[in-house]
Amino acid sequence: MQIDGHHAMTYVVARYAGLNHHQASVVAYCAQYVDEATNENPIYFENGAMFDRIVSAHKMLDYRNTVKLANHMVWIPFHFLPGNHGNEAGHPPEGRFINRLICMPDSPVARDMLRMVATHWHKPYALHMLGIAMHVYADTFAHQGFAGVVHDINRVESIESAQYMSLAERIRNDVLRHGISSTSPLGHGAALSFPDRPYASWIYVNGTGETVVRDNTEIFVQAADAMCKAIQCYLAQDHAVKIDQQPGLTAQQRNLIESALRTFDDEDGERRHEQWLQHIATGDFGFAAEVLTFHKTGPESWKEKARGPAIVRDGKPYYKYSESFFSSDWKFFHDALKTYRLELIRDVLPAYGICVA
C-alpha cells in the first residue's frame, strides 16, 4: 500500500472500529510512518543525551536492495511478514525455507503478531504500536505471494492490466521489471507498484510459474475489514485478539471504502491521498468531518515537535534537550518500532521455525 492506504484508509477504518479522531490520527500516522522511518542515525542533544532509533523502510522502497541483513531487519518484519504457508506454529510447510517466508493475508503468523502487540496495550506507546501493526497487517494482504528477501520466488512475468495507461508506459515498465526480476527479485519489486495500487486489477506469472489473478480493490477491502476487527479487539481489550468474534465493517462502511478505492484512481499515491483527506474533511465517510494531515518533515511533523530544529555545530546536528521529549509521539513511535521488531524476531517467528536475524 501507499500513503492513501496506510494513512487515510487506516484512519477511516480506525474511526469505523470506534476510535475517536485523536486516537485514529495516531494509529494512522504511525501506520504511514513505517514507510518514512529511513534514518537509523542516533540523535544527539546539547546536554550530552542521545536517542537511538531504527529504520523500518529504505529510501525509495528500494526494491533493488541486495543487503541480506537489511532485508531481514526491515522488509521481513515490517512489509513482508512471513506466512508459513498458512500453517500454525509447530507445523512447518513442506519444501524449502523460502516457502515459510512468503507473505500471506491474515496468516497464523499475523494473528500471533497481533497478540504480541496486544501485550503492550497498557503501555504509553500502545496506539503507536497498534499503528505499526496495522501497517504490517495490511501489507500481508497487499504483498501476498511475495517474500521480503532476494529470491527467484519473487520473479514476475507477463503482467497484464487494464491500468497500463499507454504503450510507452508498458514498454518502460517491462524493461524495468525484467531488469529487477533478473538481477534482484526482492519483494514485489519486479511487479513494480501494481500490488500497491488500490484500483488495479492485474494478471501475472509468479516465480513458480503459476498464473495469478489479482483484484486489488477486493484485496484492500478485505484488509480494511480485518484491520477493523483487530482495532475492535483493542477497544474491547481482548488480549487474545479473537478477530473472528468481532463484527468488522458494516455493509455501508465496506461500500464507502470500496467506492473510494475504485474511484480515486490517480497513478500518484499522494494525489489519491489528497482525495481521501478531502472526503474526510467533508464528512463523506459517514462520521463527523475532521481535518486529517500527515507531515513527514517541518514544524508540524512529529519529528520536529519532539526534538525541535537542528543546531549544527562542526557539521553535526544537535537538538535542544527537553523533558517533553519523553512523552512525544515521535519517541513513542520509535519505542514501539524497536519493541515490535525485537519481539517479532525473537519470539513470534521462531515459534514457526523462522530465524531471520
Image (cartoon, grey):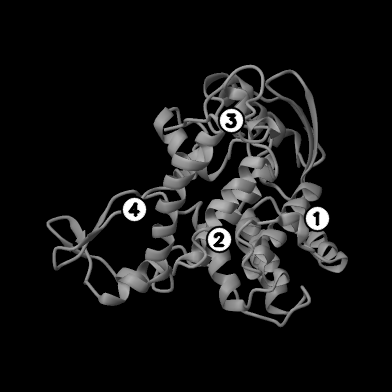
- For the residues labelled 4 and 3, the Cα–Cα distance comes to 26 Å
The crowd level at tag 1 (other Cα within 10 Å; few <14, some 14-19, many 20+) is some
Q: Are marks 1 and 4 in contact (CB under 8 Å)?
A: no
Which percent across, then down, holds residue 61? 51, 42
Residue type (three-letter) at the residue carrying disc 3? Leu
> What mark, if any, has residue 101 been given in the picture?
3
Q: Nearer the viewer, residue 194 or 212?
A: 212
The answer to whether residue 1 is visible is: no
> What mark, if any, has residue 130 been given in the picture?
2
Which one is in front in this view, the residue at disc 1 or the one at disc 4? Answer: 4
Residue type (three-letter) at the residue carrying disc 1? Arg
Secondary element type, mark 3: helix
The crowd level at tag 3 (other Cα within 10 Å; few <14, some 14-19, many 20+) is many
Name the quadrant of the C terminus: top left
Q: Quadrant of residue 230?
A: bottom right
Which residue matches tag 1? 262
Secondary element type, mark 2: helix
Secondary element type, mark 4: loop
Q: Is residue 57 left or right of residue 322?
A: right
Secondary element type, mark 1: helix
Which percent across, then down, holds residue 65? 46, 32
Mark earlier in primary sequence (1, 4): 4
